[in-house]
Structure formats: structure tokens, C-alpha cells
Image (tube, rainbow, N blue to C red):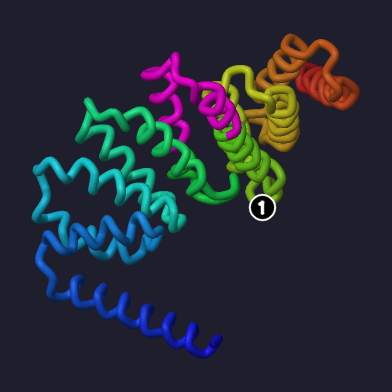
Amino acid sequence: MKKLLYFAFAVLLLSSCSEYQKVLNKGTVEQQYALATKMYEAKKYNKALDLFEKITPTYAGKPQMERIQFMVAQSNFNVKNYALAGYYYQRFTLNYPKSSKKEEAAFLSAYSYKLASPVFSLEAKDTHKALEAFQSFIDEYPDSERIPEANKYYQEINYKLQKKAFEIAKVYYTTADYDPARNYTAAIQAFDNLLEDYLGSVFKEEALYYRLKASHDLALRSTDQKISERIKNAIQAHEKLKRNFPKTKYIEDANKMLANLEEKQKQLIKS
């Protein structure tokens, strides 16, 4: 009995594959559309995508295209082609602004780009797309039931971008021995960019501390021509850290750096 069941299943499978290949390669557009929908509903998303690719040029501009484009986005999402899914959901919102599925597509576009977003240390193109898409969704659908989720994801992505910016700046500082003048200067600029781009950043205290360290180390390793101005800049960096975080956890080290800078300043005045 088991052998008969296996045989029947094998025949059914072969028949299904044979039908799919026949329609894919030689079927009419109508047959391909019908089978694409059937494959989609059966959760055979890769096969559905192959068929949708075949019929899209024919249905461009026709009423069926709205449904096709949404199913293409959904299929890519379900096979974890998240960057493509984000792109197709976004296109759907632009092409069908009056669709009842526009809000869903707008949210899923942002969510797809979030899932496509790599770890913070890698290239952040999809991360930026996700942040922009969630911001657009929040602005356009302030009363949506998805707003709490959208805000949560927005904060997660924003943190990831802040962390990336902070780590890049910190790398400039920690590798400064290879090229002190260039890397300390790059670190200071990178920390300034972080603090300007992300007001109220969770990394603000640490960024101000490392900015002080970079300014301090650059000043004390400078030539006579530049040292005086750089000491002033470093002292200002200390003041900024204290002003923003009067009880900073880095107070002891920060004050030691200030003492070094003031001592060097006195030496320059005497000489």
C-alpha cells in the first residue's frame, strides 16, 4: 500500500512539474498568469516569480498588473529576497496610490529593507533606505495600527547607523599612530559629524570624550606652528564634554588631559 502511495505521489509530482514547464515555456499569457497565481497560492514562490517575469511585459498598464506587482513583492519577501521585495513594495505604492493595499505595501517596503540591512559594520545602503521608508510611513500614516511597530524599527535602525558612525570615528582615533596628523583630524571630524547628524545620540558622551582625546593627542604631537591653536581647540573640547555631561564617567581622565594641555600652554607662553 505504501509503495502505491509513493508511486501515486511521484506521478502527481512529475505531472505537476511537466505542466509547469509546459506552461512556462509554451503556454499562452493567460495560462501563465493562471498558473503563476496558482503557484503563488500554493506558496511555490520561486516558480511563481519565473512565471510573473514572463507575463509582466504583457500586463503592463492593465488592471491585472496591480495584483501581479503585489504578488511579485510578496513572493520576493517570502523567498527572503528582501532588498528586491523592498523595491517592489515601494514601486507598488508609487504605481497604485489609491490601492487598498498601499499602507500594507508601504510598511512592508520599510520592513523588507530592514531585513536586508546588514550588520552595522557593513555597507549601509539598505539600512538608510529602511530608515527613510519607516520615516515616510510614520509621516503618511500617523494613525496606523502599525505605528508602534514602525517606531520601534525606526529606533533600531537609527541606533545601528549611529553605532556605525561612532565605530568609524573610533577607528580613526585608534589607528592614529600610522598617520597622527591625518587620523586624529579625521577622528575629530567624524565625531563632529556624528554629533551633528544624530542630535541626542546615545553615543554622545562617549563621542565627546573620544573627540577630546583625539584633540588632546593631536595638540601634544603637533609642530610649534600649529600647537597653540590645537591646544585651544582641545581645551574647548574638554569644556564641551563638561558642559553636556557635568558628572561624566570620564571626568578623571578628562581632567588629566586638561592639566596636560594647560601645562603645555604655560610652557609655550614662557618660551
Mark 1, secondary structure of its residue: helix
**Residue 211 falls within the magenta-colored stretch:** no
Q: Main secondary structure of the magenta part?
A: helix
Which segment is the magenta one?
A: 130-156
Horizontal and vertical percent position of residue 205: 73, 23
**Residue 133 falls within the magenta-colored stretch:** yes
Horizontal and vertical percent position of residue 155: 58, 28
Q: What residue is shown with label 1?
A: 178
Q: Judge left or right: residue 266 versus residue 165.
A: right
Horizontal and vertical percent position of residue 231: 71, 23
Q: Which residue is painted at 33% across and 41% down in the image?
A: 89
Position of the C terminus, as image quadrant, is top right
Give the answer, above or below, for where 176 lies relative to 150. below
Give the answer, above or below, for where 9 lies relative to 90. below
Q: Quadrant of residue 202?
A: top right
Q: Quadrant of residue 11?
A: bottom left
Q: Front-most of 209 and 88?
A: 88
Q: Which residue is painted at 60% across and 33% down in the image?
A: 156
